[in-house]
Image: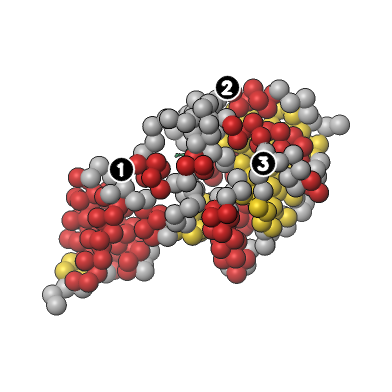
């Protein structure tokens, strides 16, 4: 068994991924190798040589990544705001841009002791679990209607509480249900939501089209089917002064703020860009009584 320099195995992987048109071939090659070796990506240079079975295993993962299986499905891991999450088939992979929405929400909570937070359309649990991680004094409720996604959220909630975070409460529920979280009406400090919002028929990368659940990505003809329910639900749940943040498509920079503005009880509507400068989420506060 001749051992091979890891450097060469990664170079081969990078080339195969680049040839397949994968966006970040070097990063993906390194992350797959790090995953197989059980080391941090930054520690790869401390592994000079690898055994043939490891090279074969890397080739196998590269082959699947080249077929556009998402990196996160191959490693089984994703992260949001430093909280690591298990993901796989049946659940939406959290995206880094959603951290901006979380940061806005956490900023709003700076002046609130023991806040109540609701994450609607939680998927993997990402937003709610990241909020609970940052604010151990918060009471966090996460809502998901899809049973497969909720199972991932449950697993992640278990992991986070084992890691010492405050437990969150999971709810199988639909934002379209006017009685959703009825006990919390008028009492919630922060509603966070990354709903399905891509207009049906919009082009999305193969990783998204074939591996994220359709219902977690697409929001009907104009992409706003679920957003409309989220606005109604947030207006009902928020306490006066509480805030809502809703992620949206980059074509929704006018329509989502307009949906929020149309609610008499909501005020201070703002639109926020993502790191690429595209319209990405809208926020509002519940007016004082
Ligand atoms: N922005 C997402 C994407 O990359 C879609 C997210 C969503 O629908 N919540 O596909």
- Describe the element under mark 1 as helix, strand or loop: loop
Q: Which mark is residue 23?
A: 1
Label 1, label 2: how far apart the Cα atoms are: 30 Å
Q: In this view of the protein, can residue 178 be seen by the observer?
A: yes
Badge 1 density bin: few <14, some 14–19, many ≥20, Cα 10 Å: few
Badge 2 density bin: few <14, some 14–19, many ≥20, Cα 10 Å: few
**Percent position (x, y) of residue 121?**
60, 45
Give the label, 1 or 3, closer to the camera: 3
- Describe the element under mark 3 as helix, strand or loop: loop
Label 2, label 3: how far apart the Cα atoms are: 22 Å
> Which badge, 1 or 3, is on the more N-terminal residue?
1
Give the label, 2 or 3, closer to the camera: 3
* Front-lying residue, 128 or 74: 74
Residue in view at x 54 percent, y 53 percent: 149
- Describe the element under mark 2 as helix, strand or loop: loop
* Front-lying residue, 275 or 260: 260
**Percent position (x, y) of residue 217?**
49, 40
Q: Is residue 186 left or right of residue 231?
A: right
Report which quarter residue 135 is drawn in: bottom right
- The residue pinned by badge 3 equals 175
**Percent position (x, y) of residue 174?**
66, 44
Tell me if residue 15 comes above or below residue 255 in the rendering: below
- The residue pinned by badge 2 equals 254
Report which quarter residue 195 is drawn in: top right
Q: Is residue 229 left or right of residue 82?
A: right
**Percent position (x, y) of residue 223?**
53, 30
Question: CB of residue at label 1: within 8 Å of ligand 1?
Answer: no
Residue in view at x 42 percent, y 60 percent: 76
């Amino acid at each position: 068994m001749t051992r091979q320099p890891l450097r060469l195995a990664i170079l081969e992987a990078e080339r195969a991924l680049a040839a397949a048109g994968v966006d970040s071939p070097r990063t993906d090659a390194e992350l797959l190798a790090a995953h197989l070796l059980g080391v941090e990506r930054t520690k790869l240079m401390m592994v000079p040589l690898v055994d043939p079975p490891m090279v074969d295993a890397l080739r196998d993962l590269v082959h699947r990544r080249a077929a556009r299986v998402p990196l996160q499905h191959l490693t089984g891991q994703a992260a949001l705001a430093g909280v690591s999450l298990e993901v796989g088939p049946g659940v939406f992979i959290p995206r880094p841009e959603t951290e901006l929405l979380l940061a806005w929400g956490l900023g709003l909570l700076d002046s609130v002791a023991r806040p109540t937070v609701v994450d609607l359309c939680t998927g993997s649990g990402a937003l709610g679990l990241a909020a609970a991680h940052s604010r151990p004094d918060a009471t966090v409720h996460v809502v998901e209607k899809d049973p497969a996604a909720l199972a991932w959220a449950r697993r992640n909630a278990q992991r986070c509480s084992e890691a010492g975070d405050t437990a969150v409460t999971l709810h199988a529920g639909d934002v379209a249900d006017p009685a959703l979280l009825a006990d919390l009406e008028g009492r919630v400090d922060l509603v966070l939501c990354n709903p399905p919002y891509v207009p049906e028929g919009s082009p999305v990368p193969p990783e998204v089209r074939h591996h994220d659940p359709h219902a977690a990505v697409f929001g009907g003809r104009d992409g706003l089917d679920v957003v409309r329910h989220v606005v109604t639900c947030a207006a009902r749940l928020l306490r006066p002064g509480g805030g809502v943040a809703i992620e949206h498509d980059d074509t929704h920079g006018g329509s989502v703020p307009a949906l929020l503005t149309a609610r008499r009880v909501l005020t201070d509507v703002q639109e926020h860009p993502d790191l690429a400068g595209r319209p990405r989420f809208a926020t509002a506060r519940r007016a004082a009584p």
